[in-house]
Image: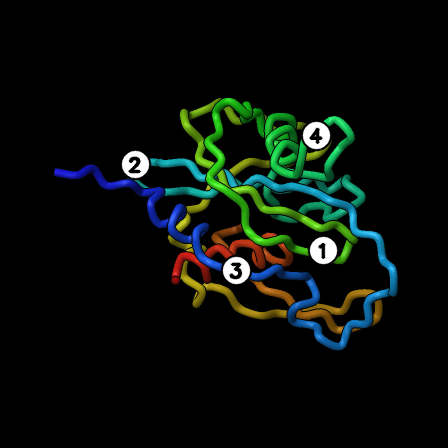
């Protein structure tokens, strides 16, 4: 009897066509400045198998951070001079932020890039956590590490559009809350993009 591969759906999803996304997707009237400079960044979407089900590992960012304080995010950050590419940046940051060593990650591939309001061009890197690890939050950046069943985000119907005023304008964005965690913005948009690919 063939063993079930819980990551098969993920591999199939990454083989399908997708398109880049943006924090401005739901705000088509936004006028972006000419010649804006986008900084390359990478985030890791770590998928861990727990009792036969896939979970996404997420972080709650420190409230003391300059960018996106207190928000739910993937481990990751901007590409530094020593990084070979966005995937290397994502793996380095995951080790720094949550204690996940790069050798403990099997990278499956990437999703299309996502542009943020903070002028980052983010490449989401999808990876399998090979073995359970001792998750350790980096105190300066991470307030909490937690996991959410992937099934919660795999259903596009779980995503809703909400809005708030930002810099004097009404800004719309995707949300997919889970328990006490308000998943929104770029994190929700990236997860929704993965859900769309998984749906085929």
Identify the mark nearer the N-term, 2 or 4: 2
Identify the mark nearer the N-term, 4 or 3: 3
Q: Nearer the viewer, mark 2 or mark 3?
A: 3
Identify the mark nearer the N-term, 4 or 1: 4
**Whether residue 28 is situated above or below residue 70 in the rendered picture:** below
Q: Position of residue 124 (x, y in %)?
A: 58, 46
Checking the image for residue 83, the label placed there is 4
Give SS at disc 4: loop
Q: Nearer the viewer, residue 74 or 128?
A: 128
Q: Position of residue 51 (x, y in %)?
A: 30, 36
The single residue placed furthest to the left in the displayed view is 1
Snapshot quadrant of residue 155: bottom left
Give SS at disc 1: loop
Identify the mark nearer the N-term, 3 or 1: 3
Tell me how far mark 4 sits from mark 1, CA to CA.
21 Å
Q: Nearer the viewer, mark 2 or mark 1?
A: 1
Instruction: Identify which residue is drawn at 36% across, 36% down.
Output: 49
Tell me how far mark 4 sits from mark 3, CA to CA.
25 Å
Give SS at disc 3: loop
**Cβ atoms under marks 3 and 1 closer than 8 Å:** no
The crowd level at tag 2 (other Cα within 10 Å; few <14, some 14-19, many 20+) is: few
Tell me how far mark 2 sits from mark 4, CA to CA.
34 Å
* Residue beneath disc 2: 51
Asked if residue 160 lies left or right of residue 4, the reply is right
* Residue beneath disc 1: 116
Instruction: Identify which residue is drawn at 52% across, 27% down.
Output: 135
Snapshot quadrant of residue 42: top right
**Whether residue 119 is situated above or below residue 91 in the rendered picture:** below
Identify the mark nearer the N-term, 2 or 1: 2
Identify the mark nearer the N-term, 2 or 3: 3
């Amino acid at each position: 009897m063939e063993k079930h591969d819980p990551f098969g759906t993920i591999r199939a999803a990454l083989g399908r066509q997708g398109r880049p996304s943006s924090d401005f997707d739901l705000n088509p009237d936004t006028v972006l400045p000419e010649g804006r400079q986008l900084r390359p960044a990478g985030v890791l979407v770590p998928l861990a198998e727990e009792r036969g089900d896939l979970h996404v590992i997420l972080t709650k960012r420190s409230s003391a951070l300059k960018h996106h304080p207190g928000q739910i995010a993937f481990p990751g950050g901007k590409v530094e001079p020593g990084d070979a590419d966005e995937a290397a940046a994502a793996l380095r940051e995951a080790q720094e932020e949550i204690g996940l060593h790069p050798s403990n990650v099997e990278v499956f591939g990437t999703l299309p890039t996502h542009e943020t309001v903070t002028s980052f061009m983010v490449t989401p890197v999808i990876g399998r956590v090979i073995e359970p690890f001792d998750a350790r939050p980096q105190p300066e950046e991470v307030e909490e590490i937690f996991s959410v069943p992937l099934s919660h985000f795999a259903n596009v119907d779980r995503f809703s559009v909400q809005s708030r005023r930002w810099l004097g304008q009404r800004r719309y964005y995707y949300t997919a809350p889970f328990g006490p965690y308000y998943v929104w913005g770029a994190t929700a948009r990236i997860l929704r993009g993965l859900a769309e690919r998984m749906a085929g």
